[in-house]
Image: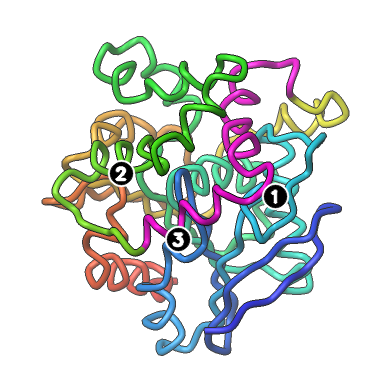
Amino acid sequence: MKQGQIRANGLDFAYLEAGEGPLVLLLHGYPDNAWTWDRQMPALAAAGYRVVAPFLRGYPPTEVPMDGYYDRATLALDLKGLIEALNAGQPCDLVAQDWGAALSYGAMAAFPELVRRAVLMAIPHPTVTARSMASPVQIHRAFHWWFFQLPGLPEQAVPADDYAFIDYLWAQWSPGHADRDHIARVKQTLSQPGAVAATINYYRAALNPALQDPALNALRSRLEDPITVPTLALCGADDVRAGPMADQASHFTGPYRFDVVPDCGHFLHRERPDEISRRILAWLKDA
């Protein structure tokens, strides 16, 4: 596995890379980083793929744009720019979890020509997410969304006591799963200048239109278009997001399947790495 850097959508992105062949792009979520895929990358590379896992906008060593936007339209352009830069604009396969999945729904709706097949994990379509927020269990699950809207306090709370907030989220979302070494890598990412505020700003931009790039309003209107890209959606059976994800098929007009993975939670690719790798490979090969 090697590391690289590339410029896309006006930003310098760092990434991990392995293998040769057709491109598979792996997108991480929060609180996480590109190393989250270190158990899938060897399997995909061995199967004949070139696998690239970028650190998303604001996650060092990717650039942290201090005055930049973090709204879904900006993130969709990040994905578009990465595919264009890494794959000469040719369609690639896409695997994404959490925020990686959230931004991929919109990017695939707006730019379907850039993705051949996709596997999206652990986060529902944003329209379904918004609808589910009226549910008490989902409000409880998404408490950090509301907490992160506060000014200043989240930036203090997240790094306090050796990033105990990050330990808490991983333990709550994937109970019983021990991943100490990887979580230490996540904390190292967040300890870099500007990273805590940048990663929180994803959530602020999601709920506050004033933090969404007004120049991208036309693109923003396309993020909810029906998705034609063949898509496999996965969620752990112990993740409360499985309920809303079971109700999102209407947003897909191309081939679509939703599978619940038993005995695992939100970070299913970390909890059941071999099984998730097999499921990804089976979907990508089922063209």
Q: Which residue is mark 2?
A: 170
Query: Residue 128: x percent and y percent?
Result: 42, 25
Quarter in which the C terminus is drawn: bottom left
* Residue 4 in the figure: left or right of residue 65: left
- Which badge, 3 or 2, comes first in the chain's sequence? 2
Q: Which residue is mark 3?
A: 185
- Which badge, 3 or 1, comes first in the chain's sequence? 1
- Which badge, 1 or 2, comes first in the chain's sequence? 1
Mark 3 or 1, closer to the camera = 3
Q: Please name the amino acid that badge 2 sits on.
A: Trp
Determine whether label 1 and label 2 are within 8 Å by CB: no
Q: Which residue is mark 1?
A: 111
Residue 188 part of the magenta segment: yes
Answer with the quarter of the image where residue 179 lies: bottom left
Q: Please name the amino acid that badge 1 sits on.
A: Phe
How many residues crowd mark 3 within 10 Å: few (<14), some (14–19), many (20+)? some
Mark 3 or 2, closer to the camera = 3
Query: Residue 136: x percent and y percent?
Result: 27, 11
For label 1, the SS is: loop
Residue interval drawn in magenta: 182-211
How many residues crowd mark 1 within 10 Å: few (<14), some (14–19), many (20+)? many
Distance between the Cα atoms at labels 3 and 2?
13 Å
Query: Residue 96: x percent and y percent?
Result: 47, 55
